[in-house]
Amino acid sequence: MLNVDKTSYWERKNYFDNVDFLVIGAGIVGYSTAIHLRKKNPNAKILVLERGYLPSGASSKNAGFACFGSPTELADDIQSFGEAYVWETVKLRLEGLEYLKQLLGTDTIDLQINGSWDLITEGQKDRFDEVAALIPYFNEQLEKISGEKEVYSIDKTISSRFGFEKIYGSFHNRLEGQIDTSKMNTAFYKLAVELDINTLFGIEAFSITPDDKAVVNTNIGKIEAKSIFICTNGFAKQFLKEDDILPARAQVLITKPIKNLNIKGTFHYQEGYYYFRNIDNRILFGGGRNLDKTGETTTEIETTRQIQDRLEALLKKVILPNTPFEIDHAWAGIMGVGETKKPIIKKVDKNVYCGVRLGGMGVALGTLVGKELSELID
């Protein structure tokens, strides 16, 4: 690839000279940051850098869940982090999903509110009873936050309805839904172009040197900007060595189209370590990071036989036990996680900022994180 120093006058003038805001990462947070910077600064020169020919992080590889909290997750998080933290986090996720809809439109991202189910296995009957007792309380809290009544309910008909096996019961969330991830990313890109925001793909940022003008050291040379925004989520550790953020790989597979598929909605299984949904008459199924947390704490975008075999086995035994299917494709994406589930949105240096660590909730939180990140500019 041509080095910055060897580009033409026209290329330097249009892309590289006098950059006001440089955003690293063309995902949900990166584009949201750039879009909101444009709204506040109509004449600024804004450049987004993306290391891949497509977005390389979780924004283009996620399962497309528009979710904000399943009952088992809420119960676990209350134990780990406390009441105030959990409901503040749920509120942020709901606000983020609403803001995503406002920014891009529901039809544009193909948002479908088909509900979600938190599945409990036959060996977790005690767990089912424990969480079931909390459902009225969870509904009270959700009504305070959202104004919606009876968001959660107990559903013990799930297996007979969808043909699952080895499932004892479930908890239904009527407000959660699903999006088309590709349509969302395309909508962000088109909006950025419409707002005169340049995006350059295939440019990898290695390090940042803060100065009066910050410098990003890349695979095509140095690029200067008045302010730089790190929006690389699970890949951010290279820039933020002292922060509590680690990569977390998520592996996914998808079946070929299945005739007369009657499964519709989003589903969480085994405390959310597994998740699946319908899309285009297929089942998209991901998870299994709990099988090898050390190995999955990586930025390598690869699948492994151990996890893929487990996903296929669960498809055969639990999700589609009586339905023939074929695997069409598998992939992996990189999330950013830490000790807590709150994103890191802060000023790193005098002209360097970051919005990272989405904790697997990028669809819900990404747009809002970008907005808040843009507001850190003095």
Image (spheres, helix red, strand yellow):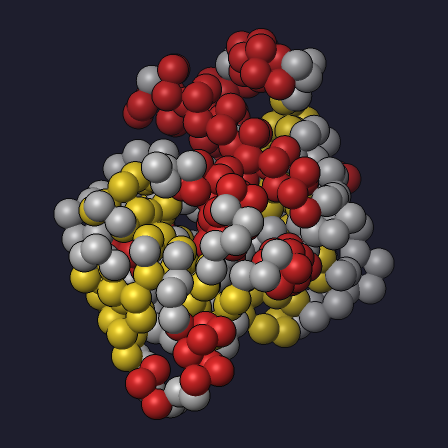
Where is residue 218 drawn, in percent x and y? Answer: 29, 74
Name the residue at the right extreme. 260
Residue located 25% across and 71% down the image: 217
Instruction: Report the label total.
Output: 0
- In the displayed structure, does residue 64 sit left or right of residue 17? right
Compared with residue 329, is residue 90 higher up or lower down, i.e. above or below?
Answer: above
Where is residue 134 drawn, in percent x and y? Answer: 51, 14
Q: Quadrant of the C terminus?
A: top left
Compared with residue 80, is residue 191 higher up or lower down, i.e. above or below?
Answer: below
Q: Note whether residue 129 is visible.
A: no
Q: Nearer the viewer, residue 294 or 29?
A: 29
Residue located 56% across and 29% down the image: 95
Where is residue 298 drawn, in percent x and y? Answer: 29, 62
- In the displayed structure, does residue 344 sit left or right of residue 265? left
Q: Nearer the viewer, residue 126 or 172?
A: 172
Q: Quadrant of the N terminus?
A: bottom left
Residue located 38% across and 26% down the image: 77
Q: Nearer the viewer, residue 81 or 270?
A: 81
Compared with residue 372, is residue 321 higher up or lower down, i.e. above or below?
Answer: below
Compared with residue 50, is residue 354 higher up or lower down, i.e. above or below?
Answer: above
- In the displayed structure, does residue 252 sit left or right of residue 218? right
Q: Note whether residue 327 is visible.
A: yes
- In the displayed structure, does residue 20 sit left or right of residue 100? left
Where is residue 183 drawn, in percent x and y? Answer: 68, 59
Name the residue at the left extreme. 242
Quadrant in which residue 225 is drawn: bottom left
